[in-house]
Amino acid sequence: MTAMTMTTLGAVAALDDDSPAARAAAYRDAAVVLLGRLKAARCSPAGMARLTVTSPGGRLVPRDPACDRRWREVFGGFKPAEFTIESASAPRVTLALALHQGTTAPPRDEPMWRGMTAAEIDAAYSARAAVPEHLAIFERWRDAGERVLASRDAHRDLPYGEAPLQRFDFFPVPRPNAPLLVFIHGGYWQAMDKAEHASLIEGHLNAGWAVALLNYRLCPEATIADQVEDARLALRHLWHGAERYGVDRSRIQVCGHSAGGYLGACLASTDWPALDPAMPVAPLHSALLVSGLFELEPMRHMSFGPLLGLPDAETARALSPMFATPNPGMRLHLTVGERESEEFHWQSRELARRWGARLEAIEVSSVPGTHHFSVMESLAKGGLLEASLAIG
């Protein structure tokens, strides 16, 4: 590697009004432009050094949770080491990014995993790149989720731990001892939020299920191992609090998407009595895991791999549900969007092959005509909802 040089790239987005929501949306729009310019300049987001953010009155604060979520939709866990906030009167958001640009060795072209090079792994597992309209989908989910949160009896941001993101939204139903759906969002361990998925669980509420939507700490501020602990802490909280929440602790189902599917599989293979002697061997009655990632080794070789806390193959294997023992007697449904890459289909097929003998029931399916994100929309009304209720 040669000496680094500094490059500056800029981006501008119009500001419709000066509300917090409009500022966050403009910040996201400017970040999209910035990412395009990074790609055109062949710069890695890992080299981001300083971001100067200019907005009316300097009121756009990148570390504000809403702004941080919008940034992560574009860049995941990649962030500059330093932020500078400046004020201007013009109704727009301006970003000026200083980043290190050096000449590196060409990408390795030897097989890294299952015969694929690092570039091929990136292509196979980069769900957002395969769905160019993903940001519009996130926006639609966000708007629909806010409508559900406003119209339903939702208890928001209940703590299951002490960290700011160790929170969940709880939706009770007027039914004693209701079954409970525990939903864990995706985002490649680095992005997304529980509120953006609230519209996806309306079918369960209408069917008489209570629902808990989980948040968890995100990478790179946390590691994947930390997130596993968050998911376990949340399930312990809900299991012990079943009477308080009016749910049947013998009918808890976890549903997770993508990275959330990974965390759901971790819950389904935890040695619960060793963690909490008061808990049974199998506190989950069932699991619906959608487009899950159960073998972490390929993630180490992706562009964002260094952000996940997987320093070596041994760590990746130890944290992979693929090599864990599932809790006996549980019902499991694994599903993937039909149009997803073969690697996503392989992840579910292989987990089913390894886990099947120990489970009461297991099914693997794909949802016709769907990709990594549209597959989730059948959870609100469609095939995934039917599958969830069938195993619940």
Image (spheres, rainbow, N blue to C red):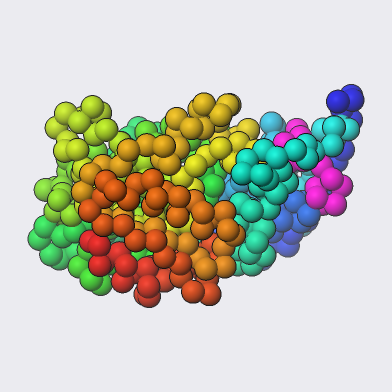
Residue 289 located within the stretch drawn in magenta? no
Residue at left 58%, top 46%? 68
Residue at left 19%, top 59%? 179
Q: Is residue 190 above or below residue 220?
A: below
Residue at left 27%, top 33%? 271
Is residue 91 found left or right of 72 in the rendered image? right
Is residue 246 found left or right of 6 in the rendered image? left
Residue 69 spot, x, y in % from top left: 55, 49
Residue at left 51%, top 54%? 346
Residue 39 located within the stretch drawn in magenta? yes
Say which quarter of the image contains residue 175.
bottom left
| In the foreground, 65 or 17 | 65
- Residue 58 visible from this viewpoint: no
Name the image quarter holding the N terminus.
top right
Q: How many marks?
A: 0
| In the foreground, 242 or 188 | 188
Name the image quarter holding the C terminus.
bottom left
Residue 296 spot, x, y in % from top left: 52, 39
Residue 137 spot, x, y in % from top left: 56, 67
Is residue 307 found left or right of 92 in the rendered image? left
Residue 207 spot, x, y in % from top left: 23, 71
For the record, the magenta segment spans: 37-50
- Residue 248 visible from this viewpoint: yes
Say which quarter of the image contains residue 12.
bottom right
Q: Is residue 56 above or below residue 46?
A: below
